[in-house]
Image (cartoon, helix red, strand yellow):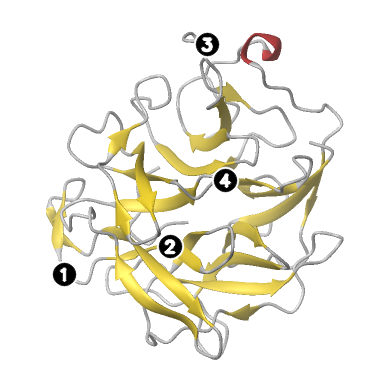
Amino acid sequence: MLKTKFTFVIIMLSLTYGFTQNEAVEINKLKINTKLDHFAARVVGDKIYFSHNLTSKRGRALRDKYDGFVYTMYEAPLSNSGEIINPKPVEKTELGRFNMSAATFSKDGRYMYFTTNHEAKGTNKLKGMQTYNLQIKRAEFVEGKGWTNFETLSFCDPDYNYAHPALSPDDNTLYFIADIKGTKGKSDLYKVAVSGHNSYGDVMSLGEKINSSRTEIFPFVSADNKLYFTSDRRGGKGGLDIYSYDLNSTNSNQEPVSLNEPINSRGDDFSFFLNKDLTSGYISSRRFKGEGGDDLYYFTKF
């Protein structure tokens, strides 16, 4: 689910912290899944975007010189059933074999922020060597050209990893993960203020209530301003679990809430996305009876 891998609870009463999950949630594995990776689905207008292995002409997953998978973004028309039909790689003016995954989009669909790699080597604190660490880039969609005007976000230091961007519903805040100095676990959740999609404020940690001593990845903020993220913290149901935290709450004792089955399973569950109707969406998972890679699931009655 990442090219430069971050190797990869408290269950509180929902009435206390304002979060409920319908016990009748229905979840379906999508037909698009194969032994390759499909993850991080995001709905933008009448399209759905997701991350997938960059493949050879014979359909084999490509790897970089560090033996890590290389990913790219795909898009498809939105369907009523949640299935992803007739996907194709996104059109971009910057061609070539570079990592492109785990994206978020502005409300009008004009801007995309995505995870990629620094063009220069930096220090990898986990491996003790020089590697092309992860960074976040912003691209602009121009009619007739596709995605263009690629820019690295100004706060991305080559010596650290930055990944999994997620815009707030009002486009004014960008959430992401990083392993910068002061990070509590292998990666923590951070945020910056966004102004006009061309300038960014100071990097701020989401704090010890949300970040644990383990790994936090894949943030997402729903239309009702709830933060969903993935963690392998102690007390979960599987390896990676999805948690919720109400950003509107004034309760100083609020703790992240682990989502119930079937959203979370005994396997790895990550990259939660909730549609504007707040009842349906997508998750990514490596669970029992999957296809072997990261699989996409569509859920309803949330």
**Residue drawn 46% across the image and 10% down it:** 252
Mark 2 or mark 3, earlier in chain: 2
Q: CA distance from mark 3 to mark 4?
A: 22 Å
Q: Secondary structure at mark 1?
A: loop
Q: Is residue 70 visible?
A: no
Name the residue tied to disc 1.
120
User: Image quadrant of residue 123?
Assistant: bottom left
Mark 3 or mark 4, earlier in chain: 4
Q: Is residue 148 visible?
A: yes
Q: Amino acid at mark 3?
A: Asn
Q: Is residue 6 left or right of residue 104?
A: left
Q: Is residue 149 left or right of residue 283?
A: left
Packing grade of label 2 (10 A; few <14, some 14-19, many >=20) is: many
Name the residue tied to disc 3.
251
The answer to which of 181 and 58 lies nearer the viewer is 181
Q: Are marks 2 and 1 in contact (CB under 8 Å)?
A: no
Q: CA distance from mark 2 to mark 3?
A: 32 Å
